[in-house]
Image (cartoon, rainbow, N blue to C red):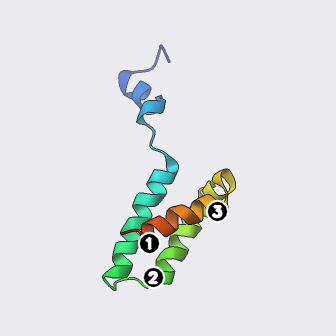
Amino acid sequence: MKNLSSNAQKINSEQTRSDPLDILFERSCVLADRARDGSLQFIEGVDMAYSAAEWSGLVDRFGDDVVQLVLADAFGGR
């Protein structure tokens, strides 16, 4: 990393990377809020979040149970 600019070093740094499960939780909370205000059906929001987790490899990386716990917290925890 010695030859990288300071911005490139920040991008490549572990400190600047967000935990992928935290990102899934935050995005799922947005979908849950939309389900609560009626602009999105609940099951559609859950399906969208789970599909995103599958597509991004989170289900393979962390397992189905962990992903479902994150979604349950996002959709039922507020």
Quarter of the figure with residue 66: bottom right
Residue lying at 43% horizontally and 25% vertically, measured from the top left: 9
Q: Name the residue type under label 3.
A: Asp
The numbered mark, 1 or 3, whose residue comes first in the sequence reads 3
Residue lying at 51% horizontally and 75% vertically, measured from the top left: 46
Q: Residue furthest top?
A: 2
Judging by the rendered image, the residue that carries numbered circle 3 is 65
Pick the quarter of the image with the C terminus.
bottom left
The numbered mark, 3 or 2, whose residue comes first in the sequence reads 2
Local crowd size for mark 1, using a 10 Å CA cut-off: few (<14), some (14–19), many (≥20): many
Task: Find residue 59 and report its horizontal and vertical position in percent.
Answer: 65, 59
Residue 75's label in the rendered image is: 1
Mark whose residue sits in front, 2 or 1? 1
Task: Find residue 62 and report its horizontal and vertical position in percent.
Answer: 64, 52
Task: Find residue 21 and report its horizontal and vertical position in percent.
Answer: 51, 53
Judging by the rendered image, the residue that carries numbered circle 2 is 42
- How many numbered discs sit on the rendered protein? 3
Tell me the distance, in whole angstroms, between the alpha carbons under discs 2 and 1.
8 Å
Task: Find residue 50 and report its horizontal and vertical position in percent.
Answer: 57, 68
Horizontal side of 43 relative to 61 (left or right) equals left
Q: Name the residue type under label 1.
A: Phe
Tell me the distance, in whole angstroms, between the alpha carbons under discs 3 and 2.
20 Å
Q: Mark 2 and 1 residues: CB-CB less than 8 Å, in contact?
A: yes
Viewer-proximal residue among 76 and 10 = 76
Residue 43 position (above or below residue 32): below
Residue lying at 34% horizontally and 73% vertically, measured from the top left: 33
The numbered mark, 2 or 1, whose residue comes first in the sequence reads 2
Local crowd size for mark 3, using a 10 Å CA cut-off: few (<14), some (14–19), many (≥20): few
Q: Name the residue type under label 2.
A: Phe
Q: Does dot 1 land on a helix, a strand or a loop?
A: helix
